[in-house]
Amino acid sequence: MKSITWIGGIVAAGLLVGYGAHLAATPKTSAAAAVAAAVNAGAPIASAVGAAVPAAPTGNAPYSDNAQYKVGDHLQQSPDLSNKPYKPSGKNDGAFREIAWESLMPKDWDAMAPFKGLKLDKMEDGDPRAMEALWKAKKYWKNAPIDPSMDGVSIRIPGFVVSLEREGEALKEFLLVPYFGACIHVPPPPANQIIHVHSSKAVKNIRTMDAVWINGVLKVEHSDTMMGTAGYSMASVKVEPYTDQAPAQ
């Protein structure tokens, strides 16, 4: 995999933090040009680099074949927020309050810092400067700071599943990530955008990259897994298929 392509995946994911769920394809002729255009314009570009990222690994089966999402898509959190799908409804499901993924990131932390000043439009695929930036970004995101005030908070949040441990056909342990394709089609998100979930009971009929809601008590806890580094953990009390309807009050 060429370094510019992977940077495309990282930048696409990073630029999507706090932006809309619908992606804008950028008609450029190379991954480097597409990434550069997005960095300069501040626009999501996962569609522009989507053709260059790898397919889901067969070893991570069962894998969702849900075609309604594209790499980089976030989930709407309320049907009346179509223009701001990253904003939560703020409603409660029992003791669990709905939050946005943004709430897990310190407000003064810049996910895109490793790419500042990087002129990707001047680089060819495989440029050593791009490779250097890639490794800096991976290290920077792996050690992304968490928000300590979120420790012990009862939350409800939507995301995509990355399977870690199964019990037959049922899922016992997984990562929850904010956008489709994370850890599979593109590199893992920052650690403060990954929740390591241990389900209180095996969850049936859930596959990698399925969209779900989870309820549970968040814990500030760093963990390294084969699919990515998580800054938070959760012993979930409820995992259910995703819908964009707010919970009944």
Image (spheres, rainbow, N blue to C red):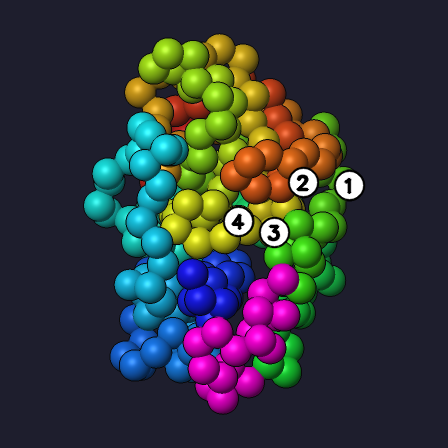
Residue toward you, 138 or 205 = 138
**Circles 4 and 3: CB atoms closer than 8 Å:** no
Secondary structure beneath dot 4 equals loop
Q: Which residue is mark 4?
A: 188
Q: CA distance from mark 4 to mark 1?
A: 21 Å
Q: Given the image, on which type of amino acid does mark 4 rest?
A: Pro
Q: Which residue is mark 3?
A: 190
In the rendering, at what x and y percent does residue 188 appear?
Answer: 53, 49
Query: Residue at 38% across / 33% down in the picture?
Result: 60
Q: Which residue is mark 2?
A: 231
Query: Which circle's residue, 4 or 1, is located before the other in the chain?
Result: 1
Which segment did they paint magenta? 119-135
Q: CA distance from mark 4 to mark 2?
A: 12 Å
Query: Residue at 58% across / 46% down in the picture?
Result: 193
- Asked if 129 appears above or below 57 in the picture, the reply is below
Q: CA distance from mark 3 to mark 1?
A: 16 Å
Residue toward you, 52 or 94 = 52
Q: Residues within 10 Å of mark 3 (few under 14, many from 20)?
A: many
Q: Given the image, on which type of amino acid does mark 3 rest?
A: Pro
Secondary structure beneath dot 1 equals helix
Q: Residues within 10 Å of mark 1 (few under 14, many from 20)?
A: some
Q: Image check: 237 left or right of 148?
A: left
Q: Nearer the viewer, mark 3 or mark 1?
A: 3
Query: Residue at 58% across / 65% down in the picture?
Result: 134
Q: CA distance from mark 2 to mark 3?
A: 8 Å
In the rendering, at what x and y percent does residue 118 appear?
Answer: 59, 81
**Is residue 132 a member of the stretch shown in magenta?**
yes
